[in-house]
Amino acid sequence: MNFSSFDYFIAVAEERSFTRAAERLSVTQQTLSAHIANLERELGARLIDRHAPLSLTYAGEEFLVYARRFQAQRRAMEQEFRDISGDQRGLLRVGVASTRGHIIMPDAIAGFQAEHPQVTVSLYEEENTDLVQLLREGQLEMVVATVEQDEPGLVVRKLYDETVVLLCRQDLLDRYYGDGVEAAVKEAARYGGLKALERLPFLLVGERDVPGSVARDAFVREGIDPDIRAYSKNAETLAALAELGVGACFCGSQLAARTFPDPEAVGMRIIDLGEGAALPVSVAWRDSAHVWSMIAEFDRALRQSMAGDA
């Protein structure tokens, strides 16, 4: 086996297509197929079911775990020797939820690139739970996400507190609550719950992202059967729907403030949901004997960017 065979197999496993994997790797399909066939011969097991749609066999799923682990170890070795030689170049793969990335990443990447122009930053935008899994699998160097401080095998450093708010048109509130609007809004903020606003139609982000989990936990805890009008992984899309009066959406307070700096002027309300809607956002990377210096440098750039915003 050689390094390329692991990379080729991982590409096929992730793309579920020899054509797309070959394009991603900039090799011919013939070269790619030959590497996979050689792997199968060496291991004595079929790794890929080539019938459409392409899928991994049980042996393939097992080998993927080893391949990703090996790939992560190889990258760690290369990074350590870059630190030893002082040759700071390469690819830094950073995971972040798309909405959070739009808010905090531009300034952080610009600051980082000013000092380390030979390091390419590749952003992976996924839901919170997926990001942590990708980090564990070695597909990312670091993530900005909501991660438990004592998460085994990870170094977790808190970056800031993210507050989830409810974004809604004022006329939508008036339609459902009439003269009782202000009382309902105050009750939601005072008790940190949604019971007072349960009549509203809602817009929800993905199940594995922070604002979505806050909303769903509240629905279950308070026995609410919500009227859900739309789902999306993209909170900006939901904020646009909220502005059109389709429903009320849950999003981070930073996004709400940036999207509607003067909410009353455009007929919007940003509703506080109490202390229980504040969750820590952290920077995390895998715990190991050697951590690539560029991980620490990007962490520093993030903190400097956040301090500047504050």
Image (cartoon, helix red, strand yellow):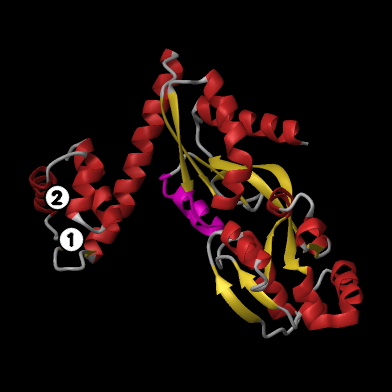
Image spot of residue 207 (x, y percent):
56, 68
Q: Quadrant of residue 71?
A: top left
CA gap between label 1 and label 2 equals 9 Å
Near-viewer residue (191 or 175): 175
Query: Is residue 195 visible from the viewing direction of this image?
Result: no
- Left of 13 or right of it: where is 18? left
* Residue 131 counted in the magenta span: yes
Vertical comparison of 222 with 52: above or below: below
* Residue 50 counted in the magenta span: no
Please name the residue shown 45% across and 51% down the image.
134
Please name the residue shown 53% across and 31% down the image.
295
**Disc 2 residue type (three-letter):** Ile
Please identify the residue farthest to the front as the structure is shown: 265
For mark 1, what is the residue?
48
Around disc 2, counting alpha carbons within 10 Å, would you say few (fewer than 14), some (14 to 19), or many (20 or more)? some
Image spot of residue 291 (x, y percent):
51, 31
**Disc 1 residue type (three-letter):** Ile
Bounds of the magenta span? 125-139
